[in-house]
Image (cartoon, rainbow, N blue to C red):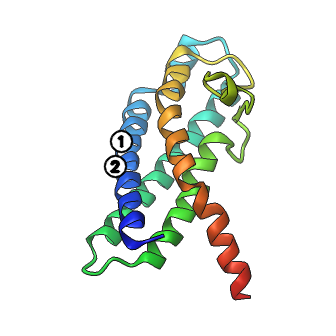
Amino acid sequence: MGNSIVESQMEDVQQFLSNTVSTFENFLNETTLLVLKEEGQGDERYYKSILSNLRKLLVFCEEGYEACRIILMSDQFQRGAAEQTLYKLYHHCIEEFFSPKNDAWYENSRSAYTGKNSIRFHHEVPVRLENLFRGLESDFQKIREELEYYETDYRTKMMQSK
């Protein structure tokens, strides 16, 4: 891929991360465990797990945004650093959104074929959580499709260098 394509993708990802960070911050600043318990009838431990994972995602997205900003601000565009950053963003932000390590929610892969939202919760959750994920999912899916290339390309490069 040429420098201009990678640079353009970095700019797109930076904008996506900026919007995502803002959405996560707003949600987490307005939503407490007490609010979720009042709005839903679910398990407190489950709500804690979801909030914990959202905080991790926020940190990953903030770090990714900062990495994109630094690379894009440098005097000379560093394609290798950009590709490595996009690969890491794919794993830390995108994959974590669709399949968090703590399994607080999961992706129903069949939903992709129906055009419906694919994020599913193991238990019933308050509407505000459902709305958060509905609002974010399409942007995450779009960036996922753009960055899947780096998943395979970066691994191939690493295997060839060994």
Q: Nearer the viewer, residue 87 or 21?
A: 87
Residue 56 is at least partly visible in this image: no
Quadrant occupied by the C terminus: bottom right
Find numbered disc 1 in the image and state the secondary structure of the residue it sits on.
helix
Measuring from the top left, give residue 48's x and y in whole percent: 62, 33
As drawn, 69 above or below 145: below
Mark on residue 15?
A: 2
> Which residue is at 69% across, 35% downward?
104
> Which residue is at 58% across, 17% downward?
37
Mark toward the viewer: 2 or 1: 2
Measuring from the top left, give residue 155's x and y in whole percent: 68, 71
> Which residue is at 52% across, 44% downward?
55
Residue 37 is at least partly visible in this image: yes
As drawn, 76 above or below 131: below
List the residue tagged with mark 1.
19
Q: Nearer the viewer, residue 125 or 19?
A: 19
Q: Nearer the viewer, residue 24 or 47?
A: 24
